[in-house]
Amino acid sequence: MKILSAAQTRKADAYTIQHEPISSLDLMERAASALVDWLTQRFSPEVPFAIFCGPGNNGGDGLAAARLLHNRGYNVQVFLVEEPDQTKSDDFTQNLHRLPQELPAQSIQSIEDFSELSPGTVVLDALFGSGLSRPLRGVYAQVVEKMNQLGGTIISVDVPSGLFADEALLQDSTVVQATHTVTFEQPKLSFLLPSSGAYVGEWHAVSIALHPEYLQNVASPYQLLTPAFIKSILKPRKKYAHKGTYGHALLIGGSYGKLGALILSAQAALRAGVGLLTVQVPQIGYSIVQTAVPEAMALTDLHDLHFTRFTGQPDAYDCLGIGPGLGQAEDTRLALEALFRLHLPPLVLDADALNLVAADRTLLRTLPEGSILTPHLKEFERLTGPATDDFHRLQLLQSFCQEHKCYVVLKGAHSCVGTPTGEYYFNSTGNPGMATGGSGDVLTGILTSLRAQGYSALETCLLGIYVHGLAGDLAAQEMGQASLIASDLSAFLGKAFLAVEKG
C-alpha cells in the first residue's frame, strides 16, 4: 500500500472529484459514511458523542458524521471551535446547514465556552486534518488540551488535530492524544514513526473509494506491507525438494553469558524453513547448543568464551548471520574484520556485530553489497550519528543504505526497511508484547534462514519482518502481550507462515 503525502492526498481527492466524477460535498459525505459505519460497529446508540469541528473540511467531515449518527439514533452534541470572523470552507458551511434543527451546533470561541460532558462521552476530534501546516494556537490549542484532560475515549477523524501528516512536530506542539484514529484510504507517514505515532493511538484506514487510477499511478517512496503483497513473495515448497534445496545457513554468535541469544536465533532459523543450519559458538557453548538445538550442526571457536576466528568455509554456506550474543571483545572485532575480507555469501548483521562495526567504521567499507543490517534505534544512531527527529532519521536511513549498498531493517513498532534504491517499507504486524529481550535475535534467525533459501535481500527483509510480527500477534492472541517472551515467536512461526499462505 502506497503511503501518500498530504499534498498527494489532496490531489487524489481532486482527481476523484474530476474523473469519477463526484462533487466535493458528495465525496465528503462518502467519507463521513465510512467513518460512521466504523463508529456504529463499535459503539451502541446508548453511548453519547461529543463532536468538535474546526472551520475546514475536517470539520465538515465531523458535521456530516454528526448528522448521520443522529439519524441512526445516537445522542450527539456538536461543538464548533472557531475564532471570531473565522473563514469556513464551502463544504463545511453546507454541512452546517444540513444539520437538523433538533441538533444545534454550539460555538466555542474561548475555553470558557467549553461545556462539561456527561460521563462516558466519546469525543470525536474533527478540528483539523492532514492539511494542517502550522501548530495549533489560541482557542484551538486550549480546546485540545481540555479534550486530552478528559481522560475518556477520543477518536480523531483522519489525523489527530495538531499532528502533521508528513513533517516533524515543533517542540511543545499541542496535539490531540487520540485513542483511535480513523483515517481515510491510507495511513499517513507520521502514524508509522515513534514520536508522532504516539499521538495516533490505534489507527484504522477506511476506504472512501478514491479513484484507483490515481492511486495506481502516483509515485511514493513509502510503502506499507499488506497480506496480499507478502503472500505474493512467499515461495511454495516443492514436492521433490530435499534439505539442500532450502539452503545452508551459518549463525555466528554466543559468548559467555549470552549463549541464549544464539540459541533463540538458531531455533527461529529452523522454524523459518532453512534446509541446513550450522552455528559457530565458543567452546563453552558446544554441548549447550547441541542439546538445545539438536537439528543444528555446530562449529567451535578456538576460544572458550567468545568469537575469535571463523572456523568454517565461506563457500559452504548460502548466508551468514552474525551478532546474537557475540560480545564486543577486541579479538572479536579483529576476527570480524578478517571475516569481512573473505569472499562471503550474503550477510545478516545484528546486535554486537553492529556495535563492533559502529566502533570501527572502516569495517563498513568491506561490507558485502546487499548485506542486511537490523539495528534498533540506538544501534542505528551509533552507525549514522543522532537524528534531530524521526523524519531526519529516515533521511539518514536512505543515505546510509545508498552509500553502503545495503538493506537496513530499522526495528520498532512499525519496523522500516531502507533500501539502496531509496524506497522505504513499513511493517504492519507486531505488538508491544514483542518489546522483550531476544525478539531481535529471533528476527536475525528468520532473516538468515530466508536469505539462505534464495530469497532476494529485499524479499528477505519484507517477508522476515512480516512473519516475525505476525508470530508475535498470534502469540499475543493466545497468551496476552505482557506474558510474551522471545521463544514464543519461534513457537508461533509455523502458524504465521500458514496465515501468510492463506492470505
Image (tube, rainbow, N blue to C red):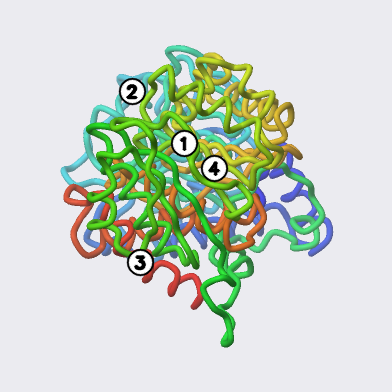
Earlier in the chain: of badge 4 and badge 2, it is: 2
Q: Position of residue 35 (x, y in %)?
A: 47, 57
The structure residue drawn at horizontal position 79% and vertical position 64%, both measured from the top left corner, is: 20
Q: Position of residue 81 (x, y in %)?
A: 45, 29
Amino acid at pointer 4: Val
The structure residue drawn at horizontal position 18% and vertical position 42%, both measured from the top left corner, is: 118
Residue 348, labelled with which disc? 4
Q: Which residue is mark 2?
A: 145
152, above or below 70, in the image: above
Pointer 2 with pointer 3, Cβ within 8 A = no
Packing grade of label 3 (10 A; few <14, some 14-19, many >=20) is few
Amino acid at pointer 2: Glu
Q: Secondary structure at mark 4?
A: strand
Q: Secondary structure at mark 3?
A: loop
Q: CA distance from mark 3 to mark 1?
A: 43 Å
The structure residue drawn at horizontal position 38% and vertical position 20%, both measured from the top left corner, is: 329
Q: CA distance from mark 2 to mark 1?
A: 42 Å
399, above or below 15, in the image: above
Q: Which residue is mark 1?
A: 350
Earlier in the chain: of badge 3 and badge 1, it is: 3
Can see residue 330?
yes
Answer with the quarter of the image where residue 70 lies: bottom left
Pointer 3 with pointer 1, Cβ within 8 A = no
Can you tell which of label 4 and label 2 is closer to the viewer?
4
Can see residue 6?
no
